[in-house]
Amino acid sequence: MAITDWPSEERPREKLLSRGPAALSDAELLAIFLRTGIKGTSAVALARQLLSSFGSLRALLMSSQAEFCSHKGLGNAKYAQLQAVLEMANRHLSEEIKRSDCITSPADTMAYLRSQLRDQPHEIFACLMLDNRNRVIAFRELSRGTIDGASVYPREVVKQALADNAAAVIFAHNHPSGVCEPSDADINITQRLTKALALVDIRVLDHVIVGEESLCFSERGLL
């Protein structure tokens, strides 16, 4: 049966408009993105097949162009459309966090850091530069590779923070393994950077590790 023959309250688009996007399943949301199915398969059924093949909605969203387009019903046009949607979501989060107070909006801050770092294939050390009212000035990527004293230079971090006229910072880096537990190197470089920034009166508010979940140094008493 085609989706157009379903009761209106069961059609994904109508369901979203009447009940909101949170009421929809992953397959229903994906079906709206797909718009149409393939011969003999509705958009919802195709969405379910794709989710089963990829393993999860996140895996589908983060797949490469070649992997995405290798599935029946998907192609370059859909891949370009998906990338545009993901980039709009990232820019929306960026605008939200820049309008908000980072300290009083931790959920927005964490969502933004996850969007920037969680699915990166390599380790990235970054910094949110904050003004004296704890509003975000900029998100700066400072290093790629294993986080240790050889890859993150306190002098360069201080230089960038001063260039941005930051009054405070929040460090963040990802663990591609998905495990958020801080290493000795993570703790040591945080301490070194905190001491270096203190010399120029710039406060370190937190260090966030992004993996499958997220961990804050402040919550662990590591700052």
Image (cartoon, helix red, strand yellow):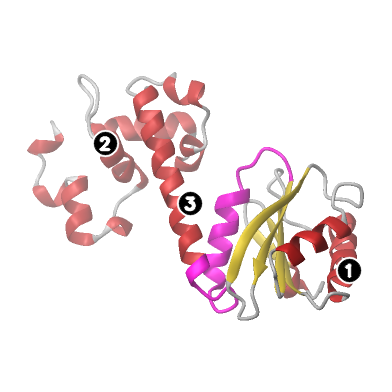
Residue type (three-letter) at the residue carrying disc 3: Asn
Crowding near pointer 1: few (<14 within 10 Å), some, many (20+)? Answer: some
Mark 3 or mark 1: which comes first in sequence?
A: 3
Q: Which residues are magenta?
A: 98-123
What numbered label is drawn on residue 90?
Answer: 3
Circles 1 and 2 in contact, beta carbons < 8 Å: no
105 in magenta: yes
Mark 1 or mark 2: which comes first in sequence?
A: 2
Kindly identify which residue carries mark 2: 44
When the figure is inspected, residue 131 is found, relative to residue 146, above or below; the finding is below
Residue drawn at x 34%, y 35% as measured from the top left: 48
Residue type (three-letter) at the residue carrying disc 2: Val
Percent position (x, y) of residue 13?
Answer: 19, 47
Residue drawn at x 40%, y 36% as measured from the top left: 82
Circles 3 and 2 in contact, beta carbons < 8 Å: no
Q: Quadrant of residue 156?
A: bottom right
Residue drawn at x 30%, y 39% as measured from the top left: 33
What numbered label is drawn on residue 196?
Answer: 1
Percent position (x, y) of residue 39?
Answer: 21, 19
Q: Secondary structure at mark 3?
A: helix
112 in magenta: yes
Q: Secondary structure at mark 1?
A: helix
Q: Nearer the viewer, residue 165 or 153?
A: 165
Crowding near pointer 2: few (<14 within 10 Å), some, many (20+)? Answer: many
Q: Secondary structure at mark 2?
A: helix
Residue type (three-letter) at the residue carrying disc 1: Ala
Q: Quadrant of the C terminus?
A: bottom right
Q: Nearer the viewer, residue 72 or 76?
A: 76
